[in-house]
Amino acid sequence: MNASLAGMLALGTGFLLALFLCALAVERGLIPTRLTRHPAVYTLALGVYASAWAIYGSLELASTSGYGYLAYYLGVAGAFLLAPVLLVPIQRMTRTYQLASLADLFAFRYRSRWVGSLVTLVSLLAVLPLLALQVQTMGDAIYLMTGAASPAPLALAFCALIALFAMLFVGRRRRIDGQHDSLLAAIALSSLVKLLAMLGLGAFALFGVFDGPADLQAWLDGPGQAFQAGVVQTDPAHWRSLLLLFFAAALLMPHIFHIVFTETRSRHTLLQASWSLPLFLLLMALPVPLILWAGQRLGSQETLSAAYLAFGLSESGWTQALAFLAGLAATSATTVMIALALSGMVLNHVLLVAHPPEAQHDLYRWLQWLRRALVAAVVLGGWLFYRIVGVHHDLTSLGLTAFVGMAQCLPGLLALLYWPGANRKGMVSGLVAGILVWLLGLWGPLLTGLPSLVVIPPGLEVLSGEPVWYIVTLVSLATNALVFIVVSLATPTSEGERAAAEACSVDAVIRPKRLPLEAANGEEFKAHLARALGAAVAAREVDRALDDLGLSPLDGRPYALRRLRDRLQANLSGLMGPSVAQDIVDRYLPYRHDGPGATEDIHFVESRLEAYRSRLTGLARELDGLRRYHRRTLTRLPVGLCAFGEDGELLMWNDALAELSGIDGDSVVGARRDSLPAPWGELLGRILAEPGRHLYKQPVPLADGTRFLSLHKAELEGDDSEPGGMVILVEDHSEMKWLEDELVHAARLASIGQLAAGVAHEIGNPITGISSLAQNLRYDTDDPEVLATAEQIQQLTDRVSRIVSSLVGFAHGGRHLAGRDLAPVSVAEVVDEAIHLIHLARSGDDVRFDNRCPAAESVEGDAQRLLQVMVNLLGNARDASGPGDRVIIEATPEGEGLRLTVTDEGQGIDESVRDHLFEPFTTTKPPGEGTGLGLPLVYSIVAEHHGQIDLVSPPPDRERGTRISLWLPRHQKEGEAPR
Amino acid sequence: MYVYRLMLFLVLGGYLLSPLMMTGWASPGVAWYRPFVIWGVLIALTLWLEQKRKLDER
């Protein structure tokens, strides 16, 4: 062996340093994310499965069992082929409930902290031989490289370096967006190194030792046959057992579980590994027989153990360096991952269970240091196991002991996925029985050197003479499964376990229950949790959970609070394991039990079903299609619809109601009725409290004004005719209400018309009398003042008669104006007369009227009714004006008509009133001063004249005031062409 | 989802029949790389099924 100790140390530490720098570069963001998160990196990281067994153990197995060594690769490849039905459901569970290890998963499913502790203990016992295998190969490789007399201390030094490296990753998870990119990248790099080293060794064997494939085949058909004759082909039953053990390893080995489920990025990445990992393993397995045959051809087998034939391929240093590097890469990655995974399991399921973290001063730091110490302890434990036990056994014995031990968890895992009827007692009984057989049959003898104590059961005498590992595998797994099934069937299952079984089972119908919580919002969550975690950690965890869910700390919806509780439990489970997390959440965030009994959380079920859609097949998929159709029907119904559960929690708020109310469904679904925004909480409460089933045309103040809503309710009966809540329809009847109001107005106007007709008749006689007396007065005196007064009395009585007749005319919709009444009317004269009449009122004397209408302009119309228009417009202008203001009346020709404008300098008209100004009974004047009939009358008269009326306030050329603009058809004089 | 059943069938079938293939691989005169070729074909098949699954779920 020609490598110096210093060279080997430089190579080893250089490799570990390269791993460290790679992790550092990823953490610092020096390597692009698209590279570090590429699915190939994940596949390479999964290559951690190819431990020292794959580099050296496979050679040992191939030398004795031929192609039987492939079981190690094909077993795990089979597990990944089944990724969609086996790995993806577990991945979904581990992600949803933040389960970081097999013990977490078992403790969650079987609802017991002791189950987690038991699985941790089993994992620890089972993995120690595998860890010892890693250290042993490292020690052997160091010896082969350097010829050092005592490689164990050197192996310990490398173990210490590896442990230090593993400790660096403890506690970094939270900093990197929940992903352990740097760890994955470092493990992927080590996989790449071992793959390249193995391919390099294989290539050297094929082209360096042999002269290519043809020479190899010739050797195999010739001299090689002597070596092949010594190979005992694996018995089919042994082969199947090996496949099963390695298949189980992919799911159960702590370090594989950690990479496959805890570090996984997405379902897609895992599914991609279903072909990419077998490809990686194929490339890893391919060089094994080449190296073996090359070693056999060179005669190295006489001086070297078969496991280390790669070191004897040539005397050159680089092939030995490749063999050492491949082993070191495999060993270091496996040890790091085992240490990380086991330390987490021991922390969560042994230490934290024994000593709960009650309000630690700095919880995160405490957990971090505890875990680092455990990492060191696990690596040291591996080294000690190697020193005490490993050195006396070959790699195959160590490896098989580990794999058979871990396989004892397989029945529990399969039941977790596919048997909701399995219970804790059954699982624990089965596991203990299986583990006892394993301890007595393999682990104990490995430790003590005593013969196996496994007794072949009666009827299975055919097994005598078979290898011990095979007998122990069969007997332990059969005992385990049998006891598991029998005890599960014979003992009752707790309610909590049943719920967890539903959450874990593939294709299970998850029916979560709705119960209110004692804490009313996120802030209260913090206060409650502070008693367990300390104020700072509680605030951080609640904020993190709120952030994950996109909720506000003040969101008090029971639905949101339940999701927040679930999320907190999942996050705490990631931190401290599911048992402790559940204890904390149950104790400090309890449900209230004073309300109505628990009901199904329909909204949550629906959101789950939406997420699971791609998993549904056959009838379930068709039923889901039907559900979605009915859901869409209700959501898109053009009438507002909402539904309440029996406990008053809002379960549905459809699109039409969201549009009407301006409240998005997502923000209120899951809230209690009384916490809905005003006026909806009170309104919906009114219909729910109503003994009848309908409420008609309730005035509801909304953002766009008062609307009139009709509400109808119906009871939803649950299964077995139990009350199941209420569904409420909300119809917007505002337009119908307005139409009805208009009808009432019209009826009122009609009655005013009838009244006016009576008044006209009653007033007509006295007015005629007054008019006659005024007439007589003119003949009785020559006094000019009296004559003028008599004249004015006559004019005013005429005006009273006309007003009464106009009122009748308005009420009858202007039916009295016929074409024959139309005559040329001088606009200037009408305006003058109106000003004159306005002045009679003797109010607003200080308002100046400025008639700028050209005397020559006239319109086609009824002079009296146009005078009425002007009196109304000028009266309004006067009322709106202040002392000293001016009212300007102008007339300008426009097309075939005349544009007549009345502009005042008053306070203007409010925008909200402007649109309704021409509707009857709309007025801006104080109560008692305006009837609200003036402008509608003007509108009516202008319409009779085929004119138009517009209003602008303030006018564009002024800062304040109002301009009313009339357009009336001009009178066309004979021979005048229209303009 | 139907694709998954095909995979389940493939894996179970492979598990039960693989000892027969083992015997074949060890026979004299059989190319040493045959097991790896068969394995490669299986990987290609899985890749094809994975693509099909993606289309199925789209």
Image (cartoon, rainbow, N blue to C red):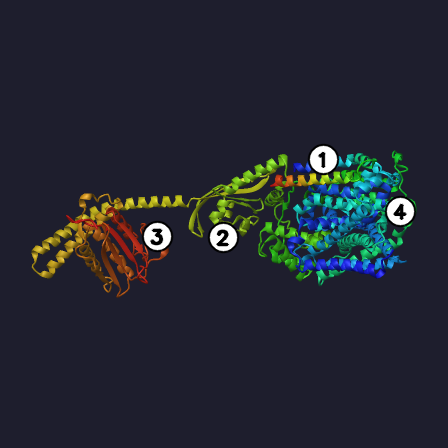
Residue that numbered label 3 is attached to = A915
Q: In the figure, A349 relative to A728: above or below?
A: below
Please identify the residue farthest to the bottom as the structure is shown.
A884
In front of the other: A972 or A195: A195
Residue that numbered label 2 is attached to = A678
- Alpha carbon distance from label 2 to label 4: 91 Å
Mark 1 or 2: the one toward you:
1
Q: Are marks 3 and 4 in contact (CB under 8 Å)?
A: no
Q: Is residue A477 visible?
A: no
Residue that numbered label 1 is attached to = B9
Mark 1 or 4: the one toward you:
4
Q: Is residue A733 visible?
A: yes
Give x and y (percent) for residue A141.
85, 54
Q: Secondary structure at mark 3?
A: loop
Chain of the residue that carries numbered disc 1 in the rendered image: B
Is tag 3's residue or tag 4's residue first in the polypeptide sequence? 4
In front of the other: A219 or A200: A219
- Alpha carbon distance from label 2 to label 3: 28 Å
Q: Secondary structure at mark 4?
A: loop
Residue that numbered label 4 is attached to = A299
Is tag 2's residue or tag 3's residue first in the polypeptide sequence? 2
